[in-house]
Amino acid sequence: MNLPDDASLLVGLSAVIVAADVEQPYVLATRQGDAGAGLPFGPFDPSGHRTFELGLRDWVTAQTGFELGYVEQLYTFGDRGRELPRADYPNAPENARIISIAYLGITPERTEIGGAFNAAWRSWYYYFPWEDHRNGPPAMIADIIEPTLMDWAGDDFERRDRARLAFGLDGRPWIEERVIERYELLYEASMTPESRRDLGVTLRAELPGEPMLSDHRRMLAVALSRLRGKIKYRPVVFEMTPETFTLSELQQVVESLLGLPLHKQNFRRAMEKNKLVEGTGELSSGTGGRPAELFRFRRETLRKKAALGIAAPVTRT
Amino acid sequence: MNLPDDASLLVGLSAVIVAADVEQPYVLATRQGDAGAGLPFGPFDPSGHRTFELGLRDWVTAQTGFELGYVEQLYTFGDRGRELPRADYPNAPENARIISIAYLGITPERTEIGGAFNAAWRSWYYYFPWEDHRNGPPAMIADIIEPTLMDWAGDDFERRDRARLAFGLDGRPWIEERVIERYELLYEASMTPESRRDLGVTLRAELPGEPMLSDHRRMLAVALSRLRGKIKYRPVVFEMTPETFTLSELQQVVESLLGLPLHKQNFRRAMEKNKLVEGTGELSSGTGGRPAELFRFRRETLRKKAALGIAAPVTRT
DNA sequence: TCAAAAGTGTTATCCTTACACCCATGT
DNA sequence: ACATGGGTGTAAGGATAACACTTTTGA
């Protein structure tokens, strides 16, 4: 049990900062010259930061000018072979190993980003187009992903099974939370630009979906998995909604996050049963049809039963 | 975004290694002289270890002589104020900051530990006696915890609510997964030896439950929360059971982990419905009554529907 | 034959899923 | 009046929780 001789270990904080509206779920992405896009990232300063979370909040505020609301730790990445974001560590030794503690942060709105920070909100589905099933499974799954994965699997049952499970092939259900399993499968099967970059392989197929620097797209996938899971048993959606909203708007936000269509009435019933929202009496004007009542989140419910979230009754028809 | 001047950042791996039998759930605890007990811990060596997980497996095997089965990352701890395990870092600078990446590992049996490694299996409930509700809520909750927490809360509604929620007071249900919330509450309310050690406060009450070095009991609490949650949707119990077992034994193992009594027939029905186990045809001898059939875990089910676990139908009567 | 533990049949209740329909507004 | 989206009543099916009972062994 000795301390490694060369302390070439760097610790950084990565942030997956999400927001959502009735149209899309968003992530804050940075652009680093023509090296490509990545996630906001900053070195962890042990002398300045009492905790990781405070450190993260600090530099997010410093860089973007807004305050993070909900924050939770996601995962710590440290496998060898990760690309170093050199720009952030100009004087790091050549063979330095970098560890990233990734956090998930939620903001209520797509706040304007200060010009100093070269970042922008992008839809999740810009990076993971196969994850948006609001209008049914995207054609690319049947057209590109399924055949290419099956080609990759050959007669390896293990691989075939993994593919079927992850993408809901052969009549298996599509499980929206398996974002990371799907991404890793595509990465392994040489279907992502990252596979070529990291492993030097030639791609088996051209698949839509923007890559990111280093393993940032993997972090993003972990974040989406976590969030899609969490939304069902913790009321995290309300971290993203405005103060008041119509039930349809709320439903659409959840749909955009899950990438699934939900069943209207059951969604409403679930809201009602859990007493998560209450009507304000006011009506929203000009929605194109009958005006909808405006609702607000009942914070008391959160206090009373912290274990409750949003039911996600999908439409199967 | 500069690299901190003094790179006094140490990265270590901590392991919560669990096992269970029909009587108790166990954790592997190390004893460090008279400094007290803690969790197995080792520095992370970036030059020797390609990934955290491989590093962890390596030194666990080196130290204890057995191989870890299931392994998953839990959480990364790095708040200032954590006590340094000096013994492991003899030449670390005085004000060094240590980061611990905690992992959960599961072994099928309480394997004998090599003498070189000063470790032993202890029941979880040795550290968290208030977590064992197999025979109803332990008296200490009503006798010590409830009054002391209410005294601590005063008329702070927030605190009262937290206490009620965490410990299932005033008719609220006991949620077995909230292990970490409960531990943190007791810590904050000056009811644990760690509160005195870290914060210098005098204890509000003497509460049973052994402390651990540094923040290891907090890590353990996180591990138990995770495991108790996971067992319900992933078949992790079978990582702890022997090859064959009777249904009662299986139920008792789950009960020991959850710290709850389960309803016999509903437990069996759940097993059956999910096709998680299959009978071997053989019978177990001499159980004190009618012999029980021996079952084994169906690994194929795991492959087919990876999202399935064990239902936990509690008895409420 | 009796204690002890294994193992089963049946029922009430609640939640999930789904169909089908009515309502209020703008053009 | 009619298109557009808001908002509800009801019912089938399945999962959950519980009661009470039978079966098979060892002492």
Image: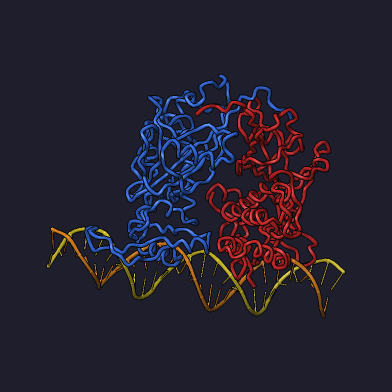
Chain colours: A blue, B red, C orange, D yellow
Q: Nearer the viewer, residue C27 or A178?
A: C27
Decide if residue B162 is on the left or right side of residue B13. left
Q: Residue at x 66, y 46 (%)?
A: B219
Answer with left or right where residue A183 lies relative to residue B157.
Answer: left
Task: Quarter of the image for the C terminus of chain A: give it.
Answer: bottom left
Q: Measured from the top left, where is residue C21 in percent x and y?
A: 26, 71
Asked whether, in this view, residue B133 is left or right of residue A146, the answer is right
Would residue B269 be visible to someone looking at this image?
A: no
Relative image position of residue A115 (x, y in whole percent): 36, 33
Determine if residue B225 is in view: yes
Q: Residue at x 40, y 46 (%)?
A: A19
Residue A226 lies, in percent from the top left, at: 49, 47
Image-quadrant location for residue C3: bottom right
Q: Nearer the viewer, residue A177 or B165?
A: B165
Of B189 and A261, nearer the camera is B189
Q: Position of residue B178 (x, y in %)?
A: 61, 57
x 58%, y 23%: residue: A96
Viewport quadrant of the N terminus of chain A: top right
Nearer the observer, B313 or A271: A271
Using the image, determine if residue A92 lies above or below residue A119: above
